[in-house]
Amino acid sequence: MSELPVAPDTTAETIYASYVKNNGDWRRDHLGASLIGQECERKIWYTFRWCTNPRFDGRMLRLFATGHSQETRLLRDLKNSGITVYDVDPDTGKQIHYKDFGGYYAGSLDAIAKGFDEAPKTWHVVECKTMNTKSFSYLKSKGVRVAKYEHYAQMQVYMGWSGLDRAMYLVVCKETDEIYSERVYFDKETYDRLRLKADRIVFAEVPMQKIGGPDSFKCKWCEHRYSCHDKKLPEVNCRTCAYSDVIDDGWICG
């Protein structure tokens, strides 16, 4: 008698599928401060205009959730250390949120806090992140402005919006649980430059200039490469109009 085949274990896949099912709408109604520090303005423009559904699988979505849980843990660690932390707006009970350009450029703070040893009386914007060992080691050797400019830019925007002139950057290494902390000072020139960049992207009717070709390292892994280089129609043809006309270098509202 032939042996019965062993039934495959599917529980892990079922868990992953639940993350995909419950992920919600991928379209954001604004250009986030977390994106504005990216090098390619065309990529940011495509993201803002909902050109490509990222379609993350369940494992990646669970990994994102793990990073978010570390944010909650870090804020709890700060509170347990005697630091005053506001991770919600006392007036609304919701996350501290700022918006610009009528809400098309916006972002939410992880927290504001004071009581740090470096400057006990100074309120700081708090930004929490996680990294793998390689990125974490590079961050420790170079600092956030060089190693993770997107995060540096995000904090500059948050400081400008909130009127604070200090930020506390906290990063957890995923493999070792080591914590890196760095104080960042507000730089108005950087904030103004990023705001002008956001203005260009939000109100541009056509894509910005490309920064590379389809085979370049900068473009090879971009989620928008098919719309950018192969002229594939975007997932949503236009944010502001009911239809669009395809043109040689992208698309424009009809």
Image (cartoon, rainbow, N blue to C red):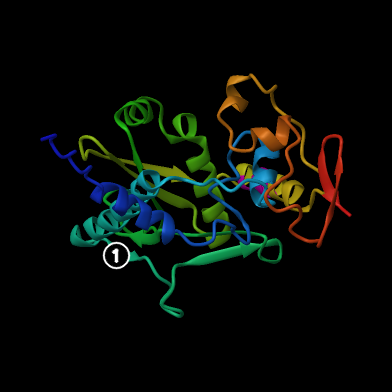
Query: Image height check: is 206 above or below 93?
Result: above
Q: Quadrant of the N terminus?
A: top left
Residue at the extreme front: 1
Instruction: Please tell me which residue is depicted at 48% across the width and 42% down the height of the picture.
Output: 151
Instruction: Please tell me which residue is depicted at 76% across the width and 35% down the height of the picture.
Output: 231
Instruction: Please tell me which residue is depicted at 49% across the width and 62% down the height of the picture.
Output: 24
Q: Where is residue 90 in the image (x, y as percent from the top left)?
A: 41, 77
Q: Nearer the viewer, residue 18 or 174?
A: 18
Q: Confirm whether the magenta stretch covers residue 194.
A: yes
Instruction: State whether residue 179 appears in this view.
Output: yes
Q: What stretch is highlighted in magenta?
A: 191-195
Name the element at disc 1: strand
Residue type of the residue flagged with mark 1: Thr
Pointer 1: what residue?
A: 84
Q: Confirm whether the magenta stretch covers residue 6.
A: no
Q: Where is residue 108 in the image (x, y as percent from the top left)?
A: 49, 61
